[in-house]
Amino acid sequence: MRLFLLLSFFGLASCVTKTPPSEHKIPMPGKQLAFTRSKGNCLACHVIEDGESPGNFGPPLKAIQKKFKSKQQLRQQIWNATQFNPNTSMPPFGRNKILTEQEIDKVVDYIWQLP
Amino acid sequence: MRLLKWFVIFFVTAAFANPEQDQLLFRQHYQKLFPKLKLQDYADGIYAIDADARESWQIIEEFPPYELAIEAGEKWFNEPFANGKHYSDCLPNKGIAISHLYPKWDESQGKVITLALALNQCLEKNGEKPLPYQKGKIAEILAYLAYTSRDKLINIKIPDTDPRALKAYQQGKQYYYQRRGQLNFSCAICHVQNAGKFIRSERLSPSLGHTSNWPTYRLKWGEIGTLHRRFIGCHRQIRAKIPEPQSDELRNLEYFLSYMGNGIPINGPSIRK
């Protein structure tokens, strides 16, 4: 018990000292990753749910499960859309490391369940 | 794969090696997108295709924020150098009403000379320090010179007496269509393929006429800036390597874009968001 307390104290303390309260240190949920300009910025080109001032380069993102057979296939579109359409304007988020692999997984989870 | 890419670029450029043919295809694309526009309308950039933006622009034009820049530019332009010479001694027609003729191929130097570069070469020739290219004095002088050239039609020549001129043009064209940056965009993806569409809340202007309105007072800058400053801004948006203003790449790019815009009137200096 004492050990546990001690550990959690250090755990907390290191959180406070090492991680400044800036946004990007706290992992973002998928929706936020998709909306944030410096991250996915998917809204730049797609209408998504309640996202504000979306662009219109690409189709609205909804009912994705009707278009993609699996999450893996959706992931490939986001990882590098040019493999399906060499002339696409959609940035290769995985190939060019715009998002990390974990961030892409979260975006996939979010986009996959959109009604 | 890389080799394949270069072959494709080679054949595409070779197949349309003729600038006149390029110009025709470039314009046909926009004619399809914006059938109501006439060639001269493209001088207005985004305002040619967006009625709301046009309306707020016309209100600002009643008291144009670039007026002071024109006045300052005229003053700098007429101020003698330490040796008593003037900019006007270096330029055709003493510099007045010539903006529509730049950039120009210079056979003796073997490169594209923009009006900004011509001004700095004039300074150096007369023992003066060249000016920084993106804003300030040079933008003001260019604003004055553009003002004296208003309504003159862009008239860029690619002389067939020197094959290097065509090569410079082709390099500019290739730069325009080449994808770059972490976000993997080319100029053409935004300003050709998606002209008129929205990227987030920003509507994209056609590239036809992109060189007519410079220098420009951007509300975002709160001051007047040069075409190459805007080029650099577009590189930044796509997280690409930032080229030097007035580098070979950007001068050749300006050569290509200006040639595409032949026949469009100069209406610089102007105002943009």
Image: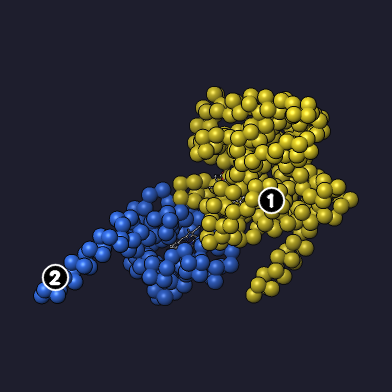
Chain colours: A blue, B yellow
Residue B187 % position (x, y)? 61, 54
* Residue B176 location, quadrant: bottom right
Give the residue displayed 58% in from the left and 57% down from the top: B241
Mark 2 surroundings: few (<14), some (14-19) or many (≥20) residues within 10 A: few
Give the residue displayed 64% in from the left and 33% down from the top: B137
Residue tagged by mark 2?
Answer: A5
- Residue type, mark 2 in image: Leu
* Residue B94 location, quadrant: top right
The answer to whether B267 appears left or right of A79 in the picture is right
Please name whichever residue, A56 or B238, is drawn nearer the observer in this view of the structure. B238
Farthest residue toward the left?
A1
Does dot 2 land on a helix, a strand or a loop?
helix
Farthest residue toward the right?
B161
Task: Kindly report the distance in space between the C-alpha atoms of the residues bearing marks 1 and 2.
Answer: 62 Å
- Residue type, mark 1 in image: Ser
Q: Residue B247 carries which label?
A: 1
Give the residue displayed 30% in from the left and 60% down from the top: A19
Viewer-nearest of discs 1 and 2: 2
Q: Residue B162 carries which label?
A: none
Residue B24 % position (x, y)? 74, 50
